[in-house]
Amino acid sequence: MSPPYFADSPHLVKCINSYFDYLDGEFHYEDKPGKTSADEPVPQRKVYDREPEPATLAGLALHLGFNSVQAFEEYVETGELSETLKWGRLRIEAYYEKKLHAQSSTGAIFVLKKLGWTDKYEPKAAVATPTVMDIVVHNSGPLPAGNEKDVIL
């Protein structure tokens, strides 16, 4: 199966944004039950018709029309609009990175590791030092005189 067709980058951005909008769920407001006075506004509460969902790489891939996460990743590596898909993938990473500050972040850590993060310190590759060349000066005759008095005729 071929990867889904995206007309251009702005079209793909709209598709990615629609996935994240979908994740917010659907809700409406209802009046809170209880005693209220005539001069006070009625307090309202948010009631979900469809609960919010967490962002997932598989969910994004399905929403965009890919048939597997592997096909999504291959398109990220070689596809025409790979930079835009990398942006969508980064939004998912940002979603889970925010969850690292929560009380229990083990699930977020697991997802971030699956997305390529590591908890091991990996020092950056050493910068190549320029090649040092030894310069050897060979004398080609008598040393020059320091002043006229050193010259013997």
Image (cartoon, grey):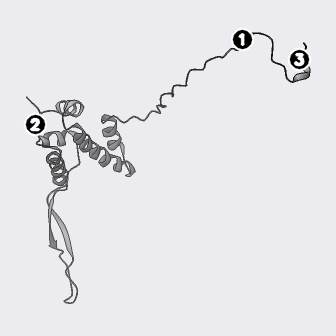
- Pointer 3 with pointer 1, Cβ within 8 A: no
The label shown at residue 151 is 3
Q: Is residue 150 above or below residue 52?
A: above
Q: Earlier in the sequence, mark 3 or mark 1?
A: 1
| Among the two numbered marks 3 and 2 on one chain, the one whose residue lies closer to the N terminus | 2
Quarter of the N terminus within the rendering: top left
Q: Residue furthest bottom?
A: 39
* 74 relative to 45, above or below: above
Q: Amino acid at mark 3?
A: Val
State the image quarter where residue 78 is shown: top left
Q: Earlier in the sequence, mark 2 or mark 1?
A: 2
Query: Residue 68 in the image: x percent, y percent?
Result: 15, 32
Residue topped by disc 2:
4
Q: Amino acid at mark 2?
A: Pro
Q: Secondary structure at mark 2?
A: loop
Helix or strand or loop: what does disc 1 sit on? loop
Residue at image location 19% in from the left, 56% down from the top: 24
Tag 3 secondary structure: loop
User: Which of the image's four quarters has the C terminus?
Assistant: top right
Where does the image place residue 135, in percent across and percent down from the top left? 66, 17
Q: Nearer the viewer, mark 3 or mark 1?
A: 3
Residue sticking out furthest to the left: 1
Front one among 79 and 149: 149
- Count every numbered label the image shows and give the total: 3
Place of residue 125 in the rendered image (x, y in percent of width and height, measured from the top left): 48, 28
Front label number (3 vs 2)? 3
What residue is shown with label 1?
138
